Amino acid sequence: MTIKQVAVLGGGVIGAGWVARLIENGHDVAVFDPAEGAERRLHESLANADAAYAKLFTAPRRAKGQVRMAPSVADACRDADLIVEAVPERLDIKHRVYAEAESTARPDVLIASSTSGIKPTDLQGPLQHPERLLVVHPFNPVYLLPVVEIVGGQQTSEDAIQRAMDFYPTLGMKPVRVRKEIEAFVADRLLESLWREALWLIKDGICTTQELDDIVRYGFGLRWAQLGVFDTYRVAGGEAGMRHFMAQFGPCLKWPWTKLMDVPEFDDALVDLIAGQSDAQSGHIPIRQLERIRDDNLVAIQKALQATNWGAGELLARHERALAQDAPEPDWTQPLPTFRVRVPAHWLDYNGHMTESRYLEAFALGTDGFMRMIGLDAEAIAAGHSLFTAETHIRHLDEVSRDQDIAITTQVVEAAVKKVHLWHEMREGTRLLATSEHLLIHMDLNTRASAEPPPAVRARLDHVAEAHTKLPQPDGLGRHVGQRRH
Ligand SMILES: NC(=O)c1ccc[n+]([C@@H]2O[C@H](COP(=O)([O-])OP(=O)(O)OC[C@H]3O[C@@H](n4cnc5c(N)ncnc54)[C@H](O)[C@@H]3O)[C@@H](O)[C@H]2O)c1
């Protein structure tokens, strides 16, 4: 059955997230929520989701589905091809809602409960068609986090599970089927154990909430985001792998390291079970390669956080500023070393070499390096002085591939009253890879108008511009796009 119309019952935090994901993927949604102000709150959440999707997707977005507020559960479910339940976490409310839904819904329509922890067997008990009920447990914000836990109850049909496993990927989601139903399923059971330990740690004065959060977000949270629990430990086991890791840390299970002391028997059967599954999961990837994948992801994640100036990324930005300040005084008479990097994995394109936007990024970071050298550092920028780029011309002269060490040098072509004309060259060793030419304008960030730089910056700029007049004019300076080479 194709799913077009969807009923979403409950338009709170989770319901609104579902509506956002559904309409984004072209489904028409009827929402029922009896609370006053529900429609306003729903549309506020949808606006946030829309803003996020506009940034997340660079592929063309689907034509959005329609949303309507339904006057009752029965009305919302009448024409539905799928019923998404996201009402409060109370069995009596959920049962009432299912009874009303079944009064109008077609008997084969799936009822997908968002419950965080109630077993589907308990949810489906009183249903007329219990085989169509299953848990599809999402995570907040539903419109951005892709995973859903799919859990069937004793009466859920295999067909219902299969239809759900087929449908949710069409919303860009990653369904994971939970093999046996338990309360709280997999995710909330894991989160609950972390939460309990966290409460103890705060109560016992071991750390504050801030310190605990920092330990997660500057530490293992960055690993979990990309490798999960077991692949993280597989790598931690080194060449000897999972079996070694377990042998090393297994005995701690018996020590009172945590308040959660109901631990499974650490016997050969447990080691075999976990090591065997871990081998099946990642045994085909040599451990050194898995380490490199982990490291590439950690670099990419921290760089992404640097762009939002948050957590580990804000720390990285601060550390980079300190490193730049400690850099030795350059030889001002030569093109200045303004930027260097080893080309990271996330700078490559489908052709296997550095993608064109990263050339500009590298050159822009070269300009940033130059700005710091002449005194336009974070402090000067905070005081309102900066350079804006008015014109750029890049030449791509040779291929740049992964893990190459590239370095940029910068020559001042001219430093007029409010303008700076720069010439960057990108090299690997002596091999010239690319050049870029920029015209930059001094700006007053408060008035957003061009302005003269502060005197100390002016003096540095004059000094370097004067020294660079003695350098030969760069080959390619002033070229325009498509100009023939002489
Ligand atoms: N918040 C989370 O992080 C999270 C994550 C995953 C799953 N869940 C689960 O999702 C479900 C909804 O949780 P939430 O966080 O969105 O709660 P919420 O309180 O934000 O939303 C529940 C909504 O249901 C409405 N409602 C109440 N009675 C109703 C009825 N009879 N019919 C229709 N709507 C009704 C309420 O007015 C409210 O807007 C719960 O089962 C919860 O366990 C929550």
Image: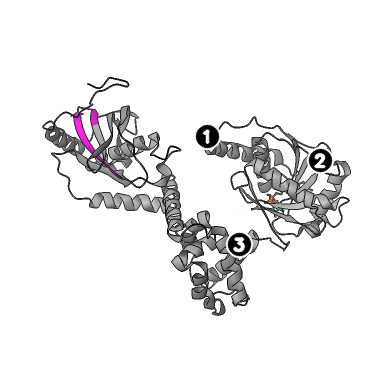
Q: Earlier in the sequence, mark 1 or mark 2?
A: 1
Q: Residue furthest left?
A: 470
User: As shown in the figure, which amino acid type bears the numbered disc 2?
Assistant: Cys
User: As shown in the figure, which amino acid type bears the numbered disc 3?
Assistant: Leu
Report the Cα–Cα distance between label 1 and label 2: 34 Å
Query: What percent of the width, then of the height, locates residue 381?
Result: 31, 40
Label 3 neighbour load within 10 Å: few <14, some 14-19, many 20+ = few
Residue identified by numbered label 3: 191
Query: What percent of the width, then of the height, locates residue 324?
Result: 27, 49
Query: Disc 1 vs disc 3: which is toward the camera?
Result: 1
Q: Is residue 124 above or below residue 453?
A: below
Residue 109: name its quadrant: top right
Residue 387: name its quadrant: top left
Q: Is residue 201 above or below residue 411?
A: below
Instruction: Provide the secondary structure element on which disc 2 rests.
Output: helix
Label 2 neighbour load within 10 Å: few <14, some 14-19, many 20+ = many
Query: Disc 1 vs disc 2: which is toward the camera?
Result: 1
Q: Give the magenta part as a residue range.
A: 405-422
Query: What residue lies at 67% left-to-right and 43% top-to-bottom?
Result: 18
Q: Which mark is residue 58?
A: 1
Camera-side residue: 430 or 470? 430
Camera-side residue: 350 or 360? 350
Mark 1 touches mark 3? (CB < 8 Å): no
Label 1 neighbour load within 10 Å: few <14, some 14-19, many 20+ = few
Query: What percent of the width, then of the height, locates residue 150?
Result: 70, 53
* Prevailing secondary structure class for the magenta stretch in the rendered image: strand
Query: What residue lies at 49% left-to-right and 65% top-to-bottom?
Result: 208
Q: Is 438 inside the magenta-drawn segment? A: no
Q: Earlier in the sequence, mark 1 or mark 3?
A: 1
Residue identified by numbered label 2: 77
Instruction: Provide the secondary structure element on which disc 1 rests.
Output: loop
